[in-house]
Image: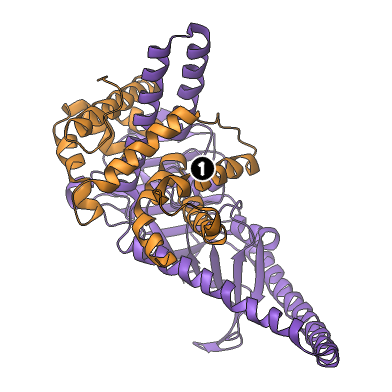
Amino acid sequence: MSKDQTSPNEEHLSQCGEDDTKQSSNNDQAVAEESHQITADEIVIHGLLSDMGRRTPNEDEMRVQAVMRAINEKKEVKPFWWGLLLKPKRVALGLSALVVFFIFSLVIQNFNSVHAASATLEKIIAAAHKMGDRTYSIWVIKNYKEVHPSQRKRPKELDGARLYVRGHDQYVLIQKITNGGQRLTGCDGELAWAMRVDGPVHVSSDLSRFRGGLPGHQNELPFINLNGQLNQLQDKYEVELLHEAGREVEGRVMAGLLGIKKSRDVGGPKRIEIWADQQTGVIQRMIMDGMPRAKGGPRSLILELISQTELPVDFYSHTYHHEPNRKIRFE
Amino acid sequence: MTFEILVRENTRTLTVFLRSRLDDEAAVDDLFQETMLVAWKRLDDCDLSRPFGPWLRGIAYRLVLAHYRKQKRSPLPLSDEVLEIVDEHFEKIHTHPGDTWDEKIGALHKCLESLPEKHRTVVQERYLEDEPVKCVADRLSISLEACKKRLQRARAMLAKCLRLKGVLATGMKQA
């Protein structure tokens, strides 16, 4: 979560600290009890409300299944090792040799695979830095949460949104909203901006200022920053070549990469799948699964390249998208 | 009693507890799994003649603290007294009449509806639309502090309402 946003948990925690200080200084049992009660109430109500807002359909069943699967996997490991210990020494030695050989083969195979994946990723990154304008369509595969229409005051529809990207820090994202209007968010490399068709233009020199409504922003990995994601892939994801790589789509040979996040402390989606033209390195399709969902929104997204047409020079500036007399608010 | 039954019985309360302490949903997912796995490994240490929920939340709470430490954030730990009241609330909800979680906390919707409009609005924006407090404050054209206060007041009113409806533990006699 970015620093300009206040975490409710931090609110609670700071309150608890103040309360604890009050207790020790006053040494008043009743005040202390009341303070504990208020803090506990706050925590539980915050949890209930957060749960109400973030809960997804079938969430409980999925959690139970995931836990039981993990437990079963752990149970299956045990007899194998116990079995080995019970075998005669000769069998154990033979098995050990086989295991060493198997591991060695895996290491070699893995090294080749990792090397190939890394080379492909470098090619894609190099292409992305060179490239001009690219236009992607965004499709939501799966949402985290179904919001009841009566509670949906300002939906930010990503399904069907269009993303225009130039270089490493210029973008325009156009989202349709359910009242029929549009929400535009963009950055020309010097100013970030956001607006609706009928409202003022919010402008800021903080380039990450208006990413608040976008999934992933709180983890410093906005999905709109494709190049940023590619760089992250190199360092913070386990990257491997996809088995189906090398297939032809519309006459182009495709290279497929799969990135799995190394640690939960890393921001961004848990899984990223990239399909790029093997020859040019241009990303044709990108699938992001397990998007950070502190703000709800989509769990899985597809970005699909629909055009590489060159756009006007000032397309990424807010002035291109509104009439000159529109009210501008600097933030 | 198989472990799966314990997991099923406690999934929702554990999720709500984790959501009360964590804003990051990915961390909620991970710590839920981790808590259950730790509980499974240490099941022999648990006195199953006593409620399982508080023991589970004890594990979860320690994992939450470890999670914050790993992120180099240092939340102030909750006192034992606070944790005890939190447990009382969760156990009260757990044993409240109703076959499903939604039935058990159905009163929360009614309490929400009974809030004064300005308080209901901040709750809806902050929680049901999952917006950061600052965004809610900006939208309502109020200061961040005023927004936080309004939320705090709304949560207090909801706690009072739920207590009156018997969903939360009575605790001490305060509003």
Query: Would residue B45 be found to the left or right of residue A79 on screen?
Result: left
Colour orange belongs to chain? B
* Residue A37 seen in the figure: yes
**Residue A181 drawn above or below residue A190:** below
The residue sitting at 38% across, 30% down in the picture is A40
**Residue B145 drawn above or below residue B170:** above
The residue sitting at 61% across, 58% down in the picture is A227
**Residue A281 drawn above or below residue A97:** above
Q: Position of residue A273 (x, y in %)?
A: 54, 71
Q: Position of residue B11 (x, y in %)?
A: 38, 56
Of residues A242 and A281, the one nearer the viewer is A242
What amino acid does circle 1 point to? Tyr
Q: Position of residue A258 (x, y in %)?
A: 59, 73
Mark 1, residue position: B61
Q: Position of residue B10 (x, y in %)?
A: 37, 55
The residue sitting at 29% across, 50% down in the picture is A182
Quadrant position of the C terminus of chain A in the picture: top left
Residue found farthest to the top:
A26
Q: How is the image coloured?
A: by chain
**Residue B4 drawn above or below residue A44:** below
Residue found farthest to the front:
B49
